[in-house]
Image (cartoon, helix red, strand yellow):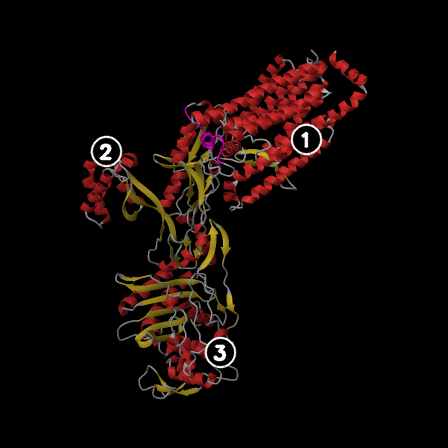
Amino acid sequence: MLWGIVIIFSLISVAVVYSATGTLAYKKMEGNTEYFLFKHSSLILLGLGCMWAAHKINYRYYSKLSLLALLVSAPLLIVTYFYGSNINEASRWITIPVINQTFQPSDLAKLALISYLASMLSKKQQMLHDIKRTLIPIFGWTVAICALIALTNTSTAVLLFITCLLLMFIGRVPVKYLAAVVVAGGIIGGTALTLGQRLDTAVSRMEDFMDPTKTAFQLEQSYIAIATGGVVGKGPGNSDQRDILPHPYSDFIYAIILEEYGLIGGVVVLFLYLALLYRGLVTVSKSNGAFGGLLSAGVSFSLVMQALINMGVAVGLGPITGLPLPLLSMGGTSLIFTGISLGIILSVSRADTEFTRAATETVPNKIQANKPVNA
Amino acid sequence: MNIKKSILLRVRIAFLAICLFACAIVYKVVRIQFMDGAKWKKISKERRIHYQPVFATRGNIYSDNESILATSLPFYRVAFDPTVADAEVFNAGIDSLSLLLSRYYKDRSEDYYRRKIKNARHAGRRYIRLNSHQIDYQAKKTMAKWPIFREGKNRGGVIFEKVEKRFKPFGILADRTIGFINEDKNGAGLEYSFNSDLAGTDGEALFERMAGGNKPIYDGTEVQPQHGYDITTTIDINLQDVAENALYKTLEKTDADHGCVILMEVKTGEIKAIVNLGKTTGGYIEDYNYAVGSQGRTEPGSTFKLASMMAMFEYTNNNLKLTDTVDTGNGVYRIKNTTMSDSKHGGNGKITVQEVFEKSSNIGVAKLMEKTFGNNPQAYVDYLHKFGLDNTLGFQMEGEARPFIKSPSDRTWYGTTLTSMGIGYELKISPLQTLAFYNAVANNGVKVQPIIVKEISKADNVIQAFQTRVLVDKICSDETLKKLKAMMEGVVARGTARNILGTDYKVAGKTGTAKKVKNGHYVRAYSASFAGYFPADNPKYSCIVIIDDPQGVNVYGGDVAAPVFKEVADKAYARDLAMHKPLQERMIPNKESLPDVKAGNFDDLTLICNKIGISNHPQGTDEEWVKVEAAKRSLNFKPNPVLGGQVPDVTGLTLRDALYILGNQHFEVNVEGTGKRVKKQSLEPGAAIDKVKQITIVLS
């Protein structure tokens, strides 16, 4: 089922991105519209490849990898802040020297942090109140990574922070501690924002959102796209607003989907994300160890929440962010990390299915294994 | 409740929350489509947002010492929306406005303008162009104070449409060579030939239609215009001026149809002056590039004898000596069924080869030609080919004329063709091509390509440099060169151009007086010319002068064209003496002539520079404040951003600007010293701002 959803997403993505990059192609590639089509299609295939590879790896390895990945990504984020390539006044990318591909370390950090939390929460279920051994490392890493990301990218940092809180909530961290971490995160994150590059942008976008009298230019154009799209849309490739909307192939791709495929297309896409989330969460109920379930839930929520926030922005439910729509937007490394995330979900469900099959033959053992947990 | 159940419950709560948010999205979409739909569709219909080109600034054309020959300046087209002004303002101002318009444009009556505006107002027309004439910035400022106009655009209805216009500071000087390009991309001269370099690439950005005009939306999708490159020519403004004056005087005196002068540096082929003047009812103007283009390509007449003599000296086993004699008889010679005559009545009798050239005897040359090439005319044509006379020079300007040289295999090759060609008829060649040939003789047989553009550059970075190109390594033997030089010096010393013999330096050259063809027949109208080089001992310049169809008694090349040559040569020679300064001194760029600007407001500086015609280049992103660097011939603006939390760099700014910036940052400013600009500041630029915001600035 997951493969089916992903392939449908990929097909929609190719169609919409091809339509939306028309203007970009005329500006940057002298009208070679196929350039972006081929580039995007090959990246999607690469993403699918990563997904396949990630699902072949036993998910238990991700537990071990997570701390290592965290230790790598923290310095990477700092390097990016100081030396990253500057796109749209924020240095979020570093270029990998040999293959000359830009890479967003926050993508890696996000995945690493979620895996780490899932791993820690599953191991420490018995001592969730132990501040020193459980809560400090969990909260410390969460706040530190989010603050580092906040230096260059406010919305990604906020989204990751919320995802982590949700994961902690699911992992049964008591609400009073969560409240404490929200306060700590707010203070440290705010400081990072002040020190970072994006404070002005964040403030002005919040102001734009809060001011009921005026609509931001992008949003106005997005509304026009949505309104003129109607119920059934203008048809594939018939968008008018793609010439005017900034980043129609990433930040505002949902507006283009609504314009070309109408309300129906928009609802279908929304439904597909919910189906994806549902599929990710089913694993939780089936899984036998807490780690698999938490990992799958964390990754699924991270993807789908980003998707919903992107769509929410396009329809004016939130302040303007720079978040792409996972699985649909054009993008380089984000497509690859999305593929890996989906592979992890598959890996968890595959391993657990096998485990269940194996377990049915050794039922007593399984109950034994679960006993301490129930105590 | 066990752990798994608890986790599952929490997952379900979270899933539910997500589903609720999804519902909110669907609700919002439905609301946008159905409740606010009409509003957004209406906005979409108005198409308030549209792409508009952002025009690139066209590059400048410079002379050899960086004087601007052509640059782009803002001009304005005056249009009017007569329906804007209310009745009171309109009725009170219309009479005086019409009068002022009529007085300013001087082309129509006061009544005409009044009628035009009133009719348009009555008909409800929202846009009329008052006059197609474009006005400059000064005139715009004056006009903006006129009645009705002074109410501004939104209440008065005046519309000043900015257009970039080419401005040539030296007016008519080298006008046709600098050239032009019109909106259909047709044109002439350097503007046309180098258009792809000069034009740059227009950018594009989104604009929103507003009441006061179009407002750009900077959303990151705009394409920045690439400003055009500058080109540096080889033209020397002083020599150009001298050549133009000399030619103009003579054309006027002789009432000639048109004329041209080209002055070229012998070693490099650099064209120092190129003048083209044609007769119009209002005097002579640069109406066509006779020096280069096909209208200037004519039968050269006697100046071509140099090529014939060169071919005959070179011809194997011919062994023609300057002292060999030819009997030119009584000045009339029948060849086949035509007659050829010499200009001297009664003929020159028996004269030497040198005298044939110096006296420009047609019969002498024709007889020598018959003797040398009579049996083998192809050999003569082959020599012309070797001299590069049958082909274009590959000149940098578009529209170079192609020489017309017959071949014995052509159907139009008659029995008399060989002798005709020998004296410069039955073939066509442009003045520039003739000059390049003479230049080769002056340059010891090395034929170089004439060049007029030395460099294509962007600010101070040279994009492309053009070097002197050798077309023919050695056009003839040194022995031939010696003979030719002796003959050309003789033309001035004793021959047809002895009227320009001077004492300071020697001139070598050849006169020409070609009969013109009208409706297929030779008529009693001439094209007088003189081509040569100077100083003859150590040639520095070569030059050609053409005077087409001079009227009066004196129509010979020696009489009308050679004096122009002499005048140009005298000035160039005198100037050259002054030019022999140490190289070091000449190399110093012309920085002093640029105004002393160190830093300032970007918009202000751009406006000022554009107004007084100083080339300026913004570098980097648009910043309100910039640092100025004087380049060789332009000012470069480098961004000097004022950032919150950091001490701004105010050095180089005027006191007023510095106080403005520092005041905005809430500094307490102490000013020391007197002078125009800030020299020093007590806090390091870029340093974090302290709590105590005190800064001392020193003027100088």
B208 lies left or right of A149: left
Residue A309 lies, in percent from the top left, at 55, 26
Tell me the quarter of the image containing the N terminus of chain A. Answer: top right
Residue B215 lies, in percent from the top left, at 39, 36
Span of residues in magenta: A213-234
A45 or A150, nearer to the observer: A45
A261 lies left or right of A368: left
Going from the N terminus, do you reach mark 3 or mark 2 first? 2
- Between the C-alphas of marks 1 and 3, the distance is 88 Å
Q: Chain for mark 3?
A: B
Q: Residues within 10 Å of mark 2 (few under 14, many from 20)?
A: few
Residue A231 part of the magenta-drawn span:
yes
Residue B640 part of the magenta-drawn span:
no
Foreground mark, 1 or 3, reads 1
Amino acid on which disc 2 is placed = Asp
Amino acid on which disc 1 is placed = Gly
Are the numbered discs 3 and 2 placed on the same chain, yes or no? yes
Residue B208 quadrant: top left
Q: Chain for mark 1?
A: A
Q: Residues within 10 Å of mark 1 (few under 14, many from 20)?
A: many
Q: Chain for mark 2?
A: B
Residue, disc 1: A343
Residue, disc 3: B480
